[in-house]
Image (spheres, rainbow, N blue to C red):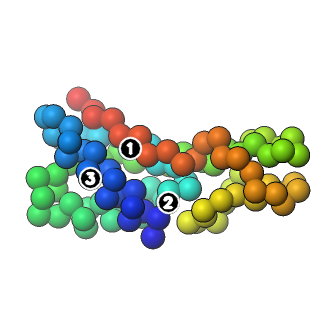
Amino acid sequence: MHEFASVQEAIRRIRKMQPVPKRVKIRLGKMRGSAKGFEEMFREHSRYTDIENIELEVENIPVEIKCSCGLEGMVRIMDHAHFVRCPKCGQVADILRGNELDIEAIK
């Protein structure tokens, strides 16, 4: 259910945009959830609001880590992870990419 918090944040940000856009591109880090789950939940939560008919383009951003053991790069994660363990040494790694929630109005 990580998408829930991300959807609520996206709705809040979109409604603050002036004028409210008809189309938006959302860059969603894989740590925050799947593009499909996000879009489905967005549709449900924006129903009967002023942004109900907004067009979404959701791009999932893969997770990239850096670990103190020297490993750096993209890693696969299970859905809904709060942290990432290094596949090489097992330590909790720093997340370089994959936790984004970027929203851009498309003209």
Give 10 or 52, whichever is nearer the viewer: 10
Lower sequence index among marks 1 and 3: 3
Query: Going by the image, does 79 lie left or right of 105?
Result: right
The residue sitting at 11% across, 63% down in the picture is 48
Q: Amino acid at mark 3?
A: Ile
Residue 55 visible in rendering: no
Q: Give the residue at the far top of this rendering.
A: 107
Q: Residue at x 65, y 41 (%)?
A: 96
**Cα distance, mark 1 to mark 3?**
11 Å
Numbered mark located on residue 94 in the image: none
Label 3 sits on a secondary structure element that is helix
Q: Nearer the viewer, mark 1 or mark 3?
A: 3
Quarter that holds the N terminus: bottom left
Q: Nearer the viewer, residue 15 or 55?
A: 15
Q: Residue at x 70, y 58 (%)?
A: 84
Name the residue beneath numbered marker 3. Answer: 11
Q: CA distance from mark 2 to mark 3?
A: 16 Å
Look at the numbered disc 1 and give the secondary structure of its residue: strand
Q: Disc 1 residue type?
A: Ile
Q: Pinpoint residue 14: horizontal percent, then vertical percent.
A: 24, 45
Q: Position of residue 33 (x, y in %)?
A: 49, 60
Position of 91 with respect to 25 (left or right) is right
In the picture, measured across the screen, residue 1 lies left or right of residue 48, that is right
Question: What residue occupies the far bottom of the structure in this picture?
Answer: 1
The reply to whether residue 100 is visible in this rendering is yes
Q: CA distance from mark 2 to mark 1?
A: 12 Å
Q: Circle 2 sits on which residue?
A: 33
Q: Amino acid at mark 2?
A: Gly
Q: Is residue 68 above or below residue 52?
A: above
Q: Where, quadrant-wise, is the C terminus in this rendering?
A: top left
The numbered dot on residue 26 is 1
* Foreground label between 2 and 3: 3
